[in-house]
Amino acid sequence: MAAGTVDQGAGDGPIGALVGELRRAGVGQVEAGTRRRAEYGADASNYRVVPRVVVFPREEAEVLAALEVCRRGGVPLTARGAGTSIAGNAVGEGVVLDFSRHMNRVLGVDPQARTAQVQPGAVLDAITAAGAPYGLRFGPDPSTHARATIGGSLGNNACGARALAYGRTADNAVELEVVTGSGVRFTARRRGGTARAAGPERELLAGLDTLVGGRLALIRTEFGRFTRQVSGYSLEHLLPENGADLAKFLVGTEGTLALLLRATVRLVEAPRHTAMAVLGYPDMAEAADAVPALLPHRPVALEGMSSQLVDVLRTRRGQGAVPAGLPRGGGWIFAETAGDSAAERSPRPTGWPPTRAAWTRRSSPARRPARCGGSVRTARASAAAPRRATRPGPAGRTPRCRPASWARTCANSPP
Ligand SMILES: Cc1cc2nc3c(=O)[nH]c(=O)nc-3n(C[C@H](O)[C@H](O)[C@H](O)COP(=O)(O)OP(=O)(O)OC[C@H]3O[C@@H](n4cnc5c(N)ncnc54)[C@H](O)[C@@H]3O)c2cc1C
């Protein structure tokens, strides 16, 4: 048995055969025990899909080898980071590749370029920690930032409370080293205008150009209409006026088009001072109505929370479970401002807080801003959810054994 191999539950049946094939292909850590498969049968969603095998790749070569075995055998393959997806994005029926155990390093930080080079399993907080000595941080911070990986956040185009200031993960993707389901490996990046592609990805990109070129009006009017339009494939990034940015386009595709092997991501300046105001409104509808009036104050973060959540906590855990000092109201907005000085971070006095809001304020000189205690997120649809991972290919959702021709297939289909 190869070093690092864990021999669990391989058996003689089809699962055992798959385990054997993966090992012969050089994949070290392959697990098929009942417990392990059960563990990976769920993510943070309500879905349950038990995989046949779980693989913990130690290096890129093992990812390519596992992919090759899956392609040959028509086995669905699902990449996984921390598994905090809430729409079943990280569960799949065939092989689950967990990048978080070994391929989790921050490979380097370039303070001049303000970028970090990372492996897919690097946790968001680890990237921020690597940038901290240079006064930098990774911008997007979903509530799960202490666990969520960059591979999963790129997969989901995660946003988080500070998306107002730092954008979505797509806005922070510079270059992605990827491999498609048919094994074409290349660096996805902004091509700029209509520049012709070279390299192994040439055919793939030509297909995408045809797809986009034939549907310019549709893509220009229906895609990228608002900043949190993150469900489905973000074809707007492939428009020539947007720089034909393949890296940004791949963000949010949930591992259905390619596996991420490495990424270069943008880092942003971490503010020296932050302040948070908690604004109370009669209900959440009024809180939502107040948002346009708050935006000119340039908040870094805005999160809404209904008092119903707090009431549950009070009922179950007692009054002491909820921090004192929340303003009156049935709905709150937590608004964070930031700056390099205490004066800059302060909410502007004119018109702040907006009328009808009761409010309290907290200031913090910390680099990593203090977080508010809860959040209400807009429910998001998954690019993959309607097509459960039961077909071969990456995430089991691309055409059988022909993922590289995906673009051509789409380009030829009617709009
Ligand atoms: C309590 C809670 C709060 C949350 N709050 C937020 C929030 O505020 N904002 C927000 O946007 N999201 C939020 N989420 C959703 C989720 O936490 C984020 O989307 C997170 O970034 C996912 O990271 P992960 O490592 O867990 O990814 P996973 O769930 O493991 O994977 C996500 C997707 O990426 C794909 N993937 C993973 N690695 C790779 C790879 N190497 N190559 C190709 N594809 C890959 C997976 O197949 C899957 O489709 C929340 C979830 C929970 C449970």
Image (cartoon, rainbow, N blue to C red):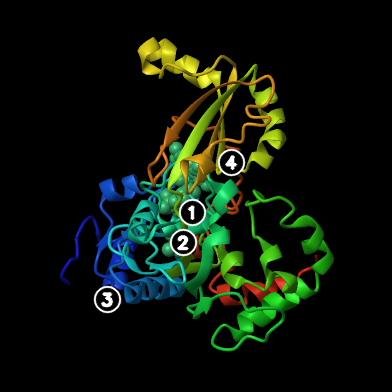
Judge: label 4 CB < 8 Å from ligand 1: no
The answer to the question of whether label 4 and label 3 lie on touching residues, with beta carbons closer than 8 A, is no
Q: Tell me which residue sits at (80%, 65%) in the image.
A: 415
The span from disc 3 to disc 1 (Cα, nearest Å) is 41 Å
**Residue 299's mark?**
4
Residue beneath label 1, please? 139
Label 3 is placed on what type of residue? Arg
Which x, y percent locates residue 238?
A: 68, 70
Q: Which of marks 2 and 3 is in front?
A: 2
Work out whether residue 318 can be spotted.
Answer: no
The answer to the question of whether label 4 and label 2 lie on touching residues, with beta carbons closer than 8 A, is no
Label 4 is placed on what type of residue? Pro
The span from disc 4 to disc 2 (Cα, nearest Å) is 19 Å
Q: Nearer the viewer, mark 4 or mark 2?
A: 4
Residue beneath label 3, please? 24
Label 1 is placed on what type of residue? Gly
Q: Tell me which residue sits at (44%, 71%) in the image.
A: 112
The span from disc 2 to disc 1 (Cα, nearest Å) is 7 Å
Residue beneath label 2, please? 267
**Residue 356's mark?**
none
Label 3's element? helix
Q: Tell me which residue sits at (32%, 61%) in the image.
A: 104
The answer to the question of whether label 3 and label 1 lie on touching residues, with beta carbons closer than 8 A, is no
Could you classify mark 3 by the number of other residues whose Cα lies within 10 Å: few (under 14), some (14-19), or many (20 or more)?
few
The answer to the question of whether label 2 and label 3 lie on touching residues, with beta carbons closer than 8 A, is no
Q: Tell me which residue sits at (44%, 47%) in the image.
A: 49
| Residue 248: quadrant of the picture | bottom right
Q: Is residue 97 above or below residue 382?
A: below
